[in-house]
Amino acid sequence: MKTFHIVMFVCFGVLIVSCDKNTGTNPTTPTTTCMIQKVVYADLASETYTYDASGRVTKLVRKQDVMVSESNFTYAGRTVAMSTGGVVMTTHYLNSRGLADSSVSSIPGVIEIKSTFVYNVSGQVVSARTTGMQFGNPIPTTSGTLEYTGGNLTKEVSMSDTDTTTTTYEYYLDKVDLAKKSYEAVYFINRSQNLVKKETNSDGSTASYTYEFDSAGKVTKSTRVRTGSNAGTYVNDFTWLCP
């Protein structure tokens, strides 16, 4: 979820590491449930979320070192606008399921990036494409396809003009991802219903995940151990807000 740049293709790698079947609940009006209030990442960067009475995100504050970025959300029908620092504007255009058909992020006169998403009948993203312009010039197009098994994303193929990367995912099928609603409330793209256990990339690198839980089964800490590129151990801590 962490980013301090304009990255509209949030689907790949970060967000859809767990897209799942839509349950019919509009992500702009989630049911009352515990939501993630704060995430502290391995590099000590953090994200803090504020919600309204309906469980919709109204503010997201990102901190990293001395950098602080505040994003404010406004809702109008099937359109969700997120303004970051009064400079970066991101707009999500939702379909009848409350999921993003497209998302556009821009800094006027500098850059505009658009991502479009295609869904199957179950409300799972099966393909995505990102295009954009920077200073009047086109930026490289990226695209991807996604496959699912039992409600969980199991294979993702990401393509650019110069590279194709395939990632496969395994899950703890006995562990439900209770952070699902929180992520959907921010990005308007569905996550998988189970916690990811391992990802394997076509370059041979892997990432294995373990978790710590509170008494209600909510994740309080995740540990990711990577091999290959960016090898290392990365620990994230989670704080929850419950009604």
Image: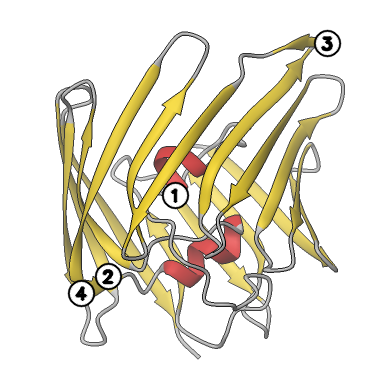
Q: Secondary structure at mark 3?
A: loop
At a point 24% along the width and 81% down the height, the residue shown is 217
Q: Which residue is mark 3?
A: 136
Given the image, on which type of amino acid does mark 4 rest? Phe
Image mark for residue 213: 4
Residue 85, quarter of picture: top right
Q: Secondary structure at mark 4?
A: strand
Q: Are marks 4 and 2 in contact (CB under 8 Å)?
A: yes
Which class describes the residues within 10 Å of circle 3: few (<14), some (14-19), or many (20+)?
few
Q: Which residue is mark 1?
A: 16
Given the image, on which type of amino acid does mark 2 rest? Val
Q: Are marks 3 and 1 in contact (CB under 8 Å)?
A: no
Q: Which residue is mark 2?
A: 219
Q: Secondary structure at mark 2?
A: strand
State left or right for residue 92 relative to residue 230: right
Q: In the rendered image, is residue 165 in sight?
A: yes
